[in-house]
Image: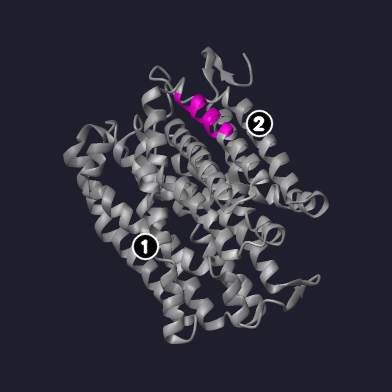
Amino acid sequence: MSAYTTAGNTPNRWVQLWLGVLCMVLIANLQYAWTLFVNPIHQAHGWSIAEIQVAFSIFIATETWLTPIEGYIVDHLGPRTGPRLMIMFGGVLVGVAWVINAYATSLEMLYIGAAVSGTGAGAIYATCVGNAVKWFPDRRGLAVGVTAAGFGAGAALTVIPIRMVIDTYGYQSAFLWFGVFQGIVLLIAAQALLGPTPGIRLPAATSVAVPQSTRSYTSMEVLRSPAFWLLYVMLVLVSSSGLMATAQLAPIAKDFGLSDTAILFGATTLSVALVVDNVMNGLARPFFGAISDRIGREYTMALAFTLGAVSYWMLAIFGSTPWAFVICAALIFFTWGEIFSLFPSTCTDLFGTKYATANAMMLYTAKGTSAFLVPFANVLKTATGSWEAVFLVAAAMNILVVLLALFVLHPIRVRHHRLLDPAGATG
């Protein structure tokens, strides 16, 4: 019996989980380390920062909006073939994309690299999240949270080496070396990845607070469900509120006069905030995911997003001093990152596991939708002359999601299990 299997030659689901985390770590710097390349590319080619950042927007669009298709393919190829082939596909694209970036001599080539890398990253993200919700019906929130944390905090392992390579050998070498390395490791990890086959007996959910459907709904059935669209609206609201604040962290610190204020071993307020925020963002995902496994998804949403609203309010009132800024920003990240564990878990609880990858990824496109609302933060700041209005609107959006979770989602979920799927109501 190998480390990859348990008694009876059943694949070890914890190994599957950590392989998924590894894959997520390997694609994390596609998003979170991009900022390290922007200025070197600008200096090398003279392209404007705005033109270069179009590549990042293309990456986010392809990484988000193509995941339902990739998830559909994984589900329909089956548990033995789907995860392995999709991770291999994503690994090849990730490696090729970074090689394209290394040799890009035009903006068009840079944009092509971004589209290819976004497609590859989305394929891997969809597969790993889908595997987590399928393997762990008893600890679904925790499993998805740990997996999502690999993407949210994984770049912490690579940003320093990438920066060292850029400083020593140039950004082209960093793209080339890390792209090839990431692609090779993903191809190797893919060989051991698979989903649970129908014959495998998994632990059932034991918490009455987390009823789960035993019926698997197709994507078309899910799209006709009011519960899905409620989840979609809720995710757009809380995701956009988080992006409004987090995407503007550096301008906010500058406007507060804190960007260059040294507070810890010579590090500035903004530098300390960025490090702490990424750590808190990663910790939030398994933390609130595990809580939701015990007390239920809606109550955990209410807890997290109420704390989020308080955090935005505190930043508006007290954020003008260095350490208050760091603490309030950290709390915002801690009460925002968990959306990537709570919402996929809730979606799978409602609609079953067979098509869980595609269904969860349809919901994930709300991240792309919410990105269109982010510029309104700048519009509101310009209109009011301060960031306080932005923070208060973000707080209000969080409170609205709390109310929707407790007084709309919860009754809909109860009705869903009792009326539409009575056999699957395990709580």
Q: Quadrant of residue 299?
A: bottom left
Foreground label between 1 and 2: 2
Residue placed at 55% from the left, 42% from the top? 117
Give residue 25's position: percent from left, percent from top. 62, 42
Residue indicated by mark 2: 185
Indicate left or right for 396 with 291 as reference: left
Identify the image quadrant of the N terminus.
top right
From the viewer's side, name the closer residue of 240 and 51: 51
Q: Magenta span: helix, strand or loop, mainly?
A: helix
Q: CA distance from mark 1 to mark 2?
A: 36 Å
Magenta segment includes 285: no
How busy is the neighbourhood of tag 1: few (under 14 within 10 Å), some, or many (20 plus)?
many
Q: Position of residue 298 (x, y in %)?
A: 35, 54
Rendering coords of residue 164 (x, y %): 79, 52
In the picture of the structure, the residue carrying the numbered disc 1 is 237
Residue range (magenta): 82-92
User: 349 or 256: nearer the eye?
Assistant: 256
Q: Is residue 372 placed above or below 349 in the rendered structure?
A: below
